[in-house]
Image (tube, rainbow, N blue to C red):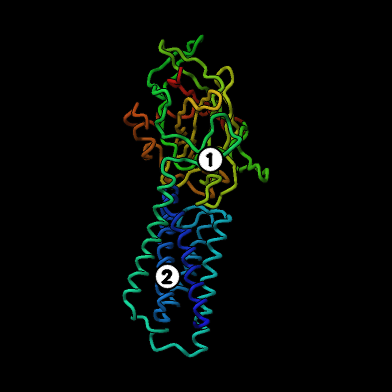
Amino acid sequence: MRKSVFLYLAAAATTAIAGILHLTLGPNSLGFNINNGVLFIVGGIAQVFWIIPILRRWSIRWIYIGIGGTLVFFAIWAITRMPGNPITGRGGGVNTMAILVESFQFAFVGLAIAIIIYERRLQRLEKNTITGSVKNKRGVLILTGIVVAIILAGLFVPMFLNQGNGPPPRTGGPPGQSGGPPGQFENPQGTTTATRQTCKLTPSLIEVEGAPQQTEGPYFVDEMLERSDIRSDPSIGMLEDGIPLDMRINVYDVNDGGDCIPLKNAHVDIWHANSQGLYSDILQIGTLGKKYLRGYQVTDDNGTVRFTTIYPGWYEGRAIHIHIKVRTFEGTEKTFEWTSQLYMEDSISAQVHEQSPYSNHGQPDVMNLDDGIYAGPSTDMMLQSNTGKHLMLDLAKTEQGYFGKFDVGLDAIR
């Protein structure tokens, strides 16, 4: 066995691993930024494909193309790390996964160069081939089938495993916390999870409108962070830069008589993007391990929680929004879950994004009415369209920034 066999096998292995990693990241990235997701998928397919010309020892020009293509893909990745880049419109961090992927890419380039040097020194190159590239067609077909199988597995197995499972299991969280949220419409007792009626707050006469549900989206992470000020990343203690936003959320259970009863001891989570449109703790965008702009509070006797955060930024394809989730527990069992999103007036968002640091990212590319989730039906089918207009955060200007309040009217479990 020639010593160069090791070089071929190692090169095939490094490009295969880089490709598989990109393929597993691609589908979820599509939901956050379609350009980023397409880059992962296309690059992953190309990298896995490179197993064939390497192991079959096609013409030397294929190795040169592999080296050049890998370097181009790395250059594109480097560009997407820059804020305001023309590919994704925003920057991205460099995390452990990113370092791992790029390390395998550079290893492939190094091994491919070593193959060229080794073969040339031994003068075993023929005119257009390193060694016979058209021999054993059956072997080529088998290898092609393996490559296709790897690509399909990389694309679809992670999605199949994650379907309906939510975040991975965690321990030590709030009562009833398990391996992930249930289905979006789940209610253990079978009652509705939202109400369309307007109720009167007992004992006052303040009216509270029922709150429709909206999709959770792919970025809820049960961080177990019970805190009112969600601006910081606990790992480094640094506050997210942005215009301060203080929030007061009141949660009410609407009884059969049409009264609003404050819902006590409910867990209220909120999470949203930072000034540059990036969520924390998301592998695909390089923020894994960071926990800024996430947290939960437990409602008091008035059904109220308060949060200190910043005005959220925008990301491609969505209007500016804040995610919210309300859950109740009995002992260790979750008894109720309601999930939705809160929105801000477009005119206020435009004013905010004229200021630093938001101006670095530019003006939002989608207004509320152009957002499919805002303009679409509620996930509980209580409303058929324009769900977002029932989920507007009531904003007021303050000396430091903004104050926002919202009343959540629910048909909770009784």
Task: Residue 233 in the image: state x and y as whole percent.
Answer: 63, 43
Q: Is residue 84 above or below residue 375?
A: below
The residue depicted at 48 percent of the width and 58 percent of the height is 21
Per the image, the residue denoted by label 1 is 169
- The answer, for residue 76, to whether it is visible in the render is yes
Task: Residue 213 in the image: state x and y as whole percent.
Answer: 41, 30
Q: Which of the 4 image quadrants contains residue 274?
A: top right
Q: Earlier in the sequence, mark 2 or mark 1?
A: 2
How far is disc 2 from disc 1 in space, using C-alphas?
36 Å
Q: Amino acid at mark 1?
A: Pro
Task: Residue 15 in the image: state x and y as whole percent.
Answer: 48, 67
Q: Look at the numbered discs 2 and 1 and tell me whether their residues touch, using CB distance below 8 Å.
A: no
Farthest residue, direction front: 1
The residue depicted at 63 percent of the width and 40 percent of the height is 232
Front disc: 2 or 1: 1
**Dot 2: few (<14), some (14–19), or many (≥20) neighbours within 10 Å?**
many
In the structure shown, which secondary structural element does the residue marked by tag 1 occupy?
loop
Q: Is residue 155 above or below residue 141?
A: above
Q: Which mark is residue 407?
A: none
- The answer, for residue 246, to whether it is visible in the render is no
Q: Which mark is residue 50?
A: 2
In the structure shown, which secondary structural element does the residue marked by tag 2 occupy?
loop
